[in-house]
Amino acid sequence: MQSADDILARLDTLNAIGIALSHERDLPTLLERILEAAREFARADGGTLYRVEDDRLHFAVLRNHSLGYFKGGRHGEPIDFAPLPLYLPDGSGNHGMVVAHAALTGETVNIPDAYDAEGYDFSGTRAFDARTGYRSQSFLTVPMKDHDGRVIGVLQLINAKDDQGNTVAFTDADQRLVESLASQAAIALNNRRLIDQLENLFEALINLINTAIDEKSPYTGGHCERVPVLTSLLAEAAHRTEVGPLAGFRMNEADRYELKIAGLLHDCGKITTPVHVVDKATKLQTLFDRIELVDTRFEVLRRDAEIALLRGELDEDGYRDRLARLDADREAVREANIGGEFMDDARIANIRRIGAMRWRGPDGSEQSFLSADELENLCIRRGTLTEAERGIINHHIVVTIRMLEALPWPPHLRRVPEYAGGHHERMDGKGYPRGLTREQMSIPARVMGIADVFEALTAADRPYKTGKTLSESLTILGRMKLDNHVDPDLFDVFLRERVYLEYAERFLPPEQIDEIDWHRIPGVSPALAAELAAGDEARRAAKGAAAPRQGR
């Protein structure tokens, strides 16, 4: 007979367990805690928690103190037992198995001694005991029902112990308290499942948006996939840092998930960006590359020269000189159209000279060789975008922020718009769209800024450029550090923790992963350069030592 104080103490424990279960976010850990709480609560030697799925009972967690079994959940060994069927091959309920009976009927089964029980098949239990030397005696099997009364799991405890450690039957008080615990646990488990389902749906919708962007432009789909990965790698590296300005930066699982979602959504505004701007591979490209039209004009001028020769208006030398000049001009326009090299003043002046040449159009009228729009595009100094088109591209971040800030984010995701909307800001306040300074930005937002830049530098799937090598990319990133474009502390972590290398080995082809002379990378201190060089040498030595063994 339990005293009133003992019962009150166990009720307080039950209440505390319910509160703890409601706060657990990780499903495997939640399942583990449910069984452990029930086992300790009822002073049981062991127990198993089953989940009901697809008309079967799946082993989720299994514990046995005497035998040292610790399986399932977050921290146990994997469970390789086959699920138990709720129905027999003829379609009838599997009521001979006590856990299946509890799941099918929704009723608790309390058995003082399995060896004396009638109506249930404990042959498997007897075989287990014979094999292990264990004595399975008292069983308490409790169905776990959600708020709709649907059985979503079964909690089975085995061998209750008294104060002297003897195996006894589970009391009525034990049964009522475990049933209360099972009810609270079922609600917590169902809530966790619903949250997981909502998160899965949410991420599926995000992937749907990224797929839509990918369908518009295959050149941005990989970016939407890789930036979140690189963001996570750098954030984890900063989390591990124990020295320097970032030593106090730490993340929990909720922070990690929030940053993951921000990474997945950081370019969602590109869904509104016109395809012909995103995919503009050359300066003259719109729906097609207009260089072909310019080539046609050069052909017209060549034929005009041939006609002038036939009419006696040009001699042979003049004819050859004109063709050579036209070929040189055509090559100059073609090179300018690629947008691969910086256009200096001399090259721009040459393009303007070509643009001012005259030719007769299809209607017979004389006109400038290049239209004003063609001239503007061919004179772009760097890249393939005009200022107006660059403004269209840059506007995607404004749309991203506007879209994300319009969503009713729950508290644990409220910083997603900030993180996702800050990856084009600069540490000196010269970025866009808000012109934030380093002090006005959170560390995760600064992390995403570096991830976005480095992915873009190394990406080989852009229509307007080839992927840069590691040494080229880190050289540019180092200059950006010195120019106060990216966070200097995160830049150092990016190198010291070899984040760039981990990312490269996952996503870059071997030809882009080149040797790096750290003393020539801008923004790297002599001490860090020496540390990185020593690490590279150690890895090369380790690979060299491993090579002969791999060949045996």
Image (cartoon, rainbow, N blue to C red):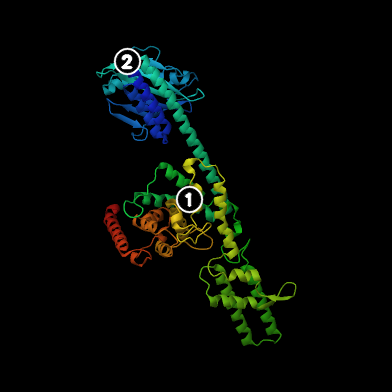
Q: CA distance from mark 2 to mark 1?
A: 56 Å
User: Mark 2 = which residue?
Assistant: 3
The image shows residue 216, relative to residue 195, as above or below, that is below
**Could you say where residue 256 lies in the image, as x and y percent from the top left?**
42, 45
Dot 2 amino acid type: Ser
* Residue drawn at the location 43% of the way across and 65% of the way down: 483
Query: Label 1, on which residue?
Result: 419
Quadrant into which the N terminus falls: top left
Name the element at disc 1: helix
Quarter where residue 60 is shown: top left
Q: Amino acid at mark 1?
A: Tyr
Question: Residue 342: x percent and y percent?
Answer: 51, 71
Asked if residue 104 can be seen in this view, the reply is yes
Q: Which of these two is toward me, 489 or 448?
A: 489
**SS of the residue at dot 2?**
loop
Tell which circle, 2 or 1, labels the residue nearer the N-terminal end.
Answer: 2
Residue pictured at 29% horizontal, 20% vertical: 129
Residue 472 at what x, y percent from top left? 42, 64
Q: Is residue 97 visible?
A: no
* Residue 133 placement: quadrant: top left
Q: Does 261 appear above or below 198?
A: below
